[in-house]
Amino acid sequence: MAILIRMPEIAANATSAVIKEWSRKEGDSIRIGETLAEIETDKALIEFDADQAGILGKILAPAGKDIEVGAPIAVLFAEGETSVDIAAVLAAAGVGTASGTAPAAAPAPAAPFAPAPAVSATAQRAPAGGRVFVSPLARRLARDRGIGLQGVQGSGPHGRIVKRDVDALAAATASKPVNVNAAATSTSVASSASKATDAGYVEIAHSGMRRTIARRLSESKSTIPHFYLSAACKMDKLMALRAEINAGSSRKISVNDFIVKAVAAALKASPQMNVGWTDSALRQYAQADISVAVSTDGGLITPVVRAADSKSLSAVSAEIADLAARARSGQLAPEEYQGGSFTISNLGMFGVQEFSAIINPPQAAILAVGTTSQQAVVADGAIAIASVMNVTLSVDHRAIDGAVAAQWLALFQRHIEHPLSTLI
């Protein structure tokens, strides 16, 4: 009998999500494990796979619409079904459609259900004209790079095209000459399209991530009593140690890697700062799980370096690089960007001297990091030139008192100005 497919709870405590793109169309045969849709959460794009085989008989939730978790999004027909009363299926489940209207009975596809044939993954090309099996991520990358996938045989399961296949195609075509005329025509068409508007602006629909960012930051700024503490950290010893490490290492350590370690060390020494606020209790964390803000095309995401206080500097560096790369390509799993105990937001690479960041609840603090620059300082009664980094700590006054925050900031400054202490 027909099966009702519902919007899954992709992320913990999520109340809704957006179907970015359906990977299958009505009438397609579906095997267990095949991707049905690409679902956008507030932080990432997740592939939603089928856990039962059948035929995708009716799509109830269109792509691009925000759907509540648990709401029906599609109906999967069973093998041999010739027609299905969709309204009856919904009524039997005690729900309406995701859009709020119950459709009339829908005929099942005329073709009988048959499992999709297995395809050899060793071939480089597939016969043109057939259905293209491709992961949503690979499809998006191919579209962004202007790469056609028809006739391409993937290296994934059952010949599915995956990211590495698109990367290989991009590399293979990178050295080919560009059709200047075609490029000029494309540019001309794009220019014409942009001039077609009379209002003087273009409206870009909010993504699920952007809507969530707006909601959470508005709630944070309006409900959390922020207070701010600033410090100027002398960076000369850290910069010298970093240069020495990088001179003999294949992995280059960044200033931000040192900052993560210094934050973690300070949190370990001052556990009163490693807390989160809830309406019922103060949550004190057992380890320093540091959220590192990463800018992506869709907005800000904060992948978490778990137990940063117990990891080496090189391990922290490698983990941050991996998390940041996968964050920008939308490949993070929910558990990789949820549940941190403290956040670092670093805009120093953009030349920002200093700024104040908004707390990411239920966390109780966030450190805003500016650039490192040459400044005049007083040392031993004389003016000297030093490398200085300005930081600003935003604190939730409900969870942390001013004296505790000040003591923590002093600990952090000490670790930054004496960086060997973070490595011991």
Image (cartoon, rainbow, N blue to C red):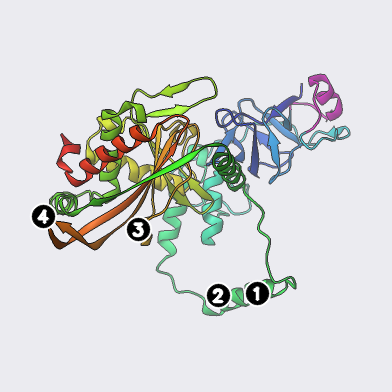
Can you give x and y, in whole percent of width and height, for residue 189 in the image? 65, 74
Residue 271 percent coordinates (x, y):
32, 26
Q: How many neighbours does mark 3 have within 10 angstroms: few (below 14), some (14-19), or many (20 or more)?
A: few
User: Judging from the image, what secondary structure is the residue with disc 3 in?
Assistant: helix
- Residue range (magenta): 77-97
Q: Quadrant of the C terminus?
A: top left
Q: Residues within 10 Å of mark 2 (few under 14, many from 20)?
A: few
Tell me the distance, in whole angstroms, between the alpha carbons under discs 1 and 4. Answer: 66 Å
256 relative to 190 in the view: left or right = left
Depth-wise, is mark 2 or mark 3 nearer the camera?
A: 3
Tag 2–tag 4 contact (CB < 8 Å) = no
Q: Earlier in the sequence, mark 2 or mark 3?
A: 2
Query: For the point 56% across and 44% down, which residue is it?
Result: 213
Would you say the residues marked 2 and 3 are in contact, meaning their CB atoms lie under 8 Å apart? no
The residue indicated by pointer 3 is: 349
Which residue sits furthest right? Answer: 104
* Amino acid on which disc 3 is placed: Met
Of helix, strand and loop, which one carries label 1? helix
Q: Who comes first in sequence, dot 3 or dot 1?
A: 1
Q: Mark 1 or mark 4, which has the lower sequence index? A: 1
The residue singled out by tag 2 in the image is 183
Q: CA distance from mark 2 to mark 1?
A: 10 Å
Amino acid type of the residue tagged 2 in the rendering: Ala
Quadrant hosting residue 414: top left
User: Is residue 167 something that shows in the picture?
Assistant: yes
The type of residue carrying mark 1 is: Val
**Residue on which the image places disc 4:** 380
| Mark 3–mark 1 distance (CA, rounded to whole Å) | 36 Å
In this figure, which residue is indicated by the disc labeled 1? 189
* SS at mark 2 in the image: helix
Q: Is residue 123 visible?
A: no
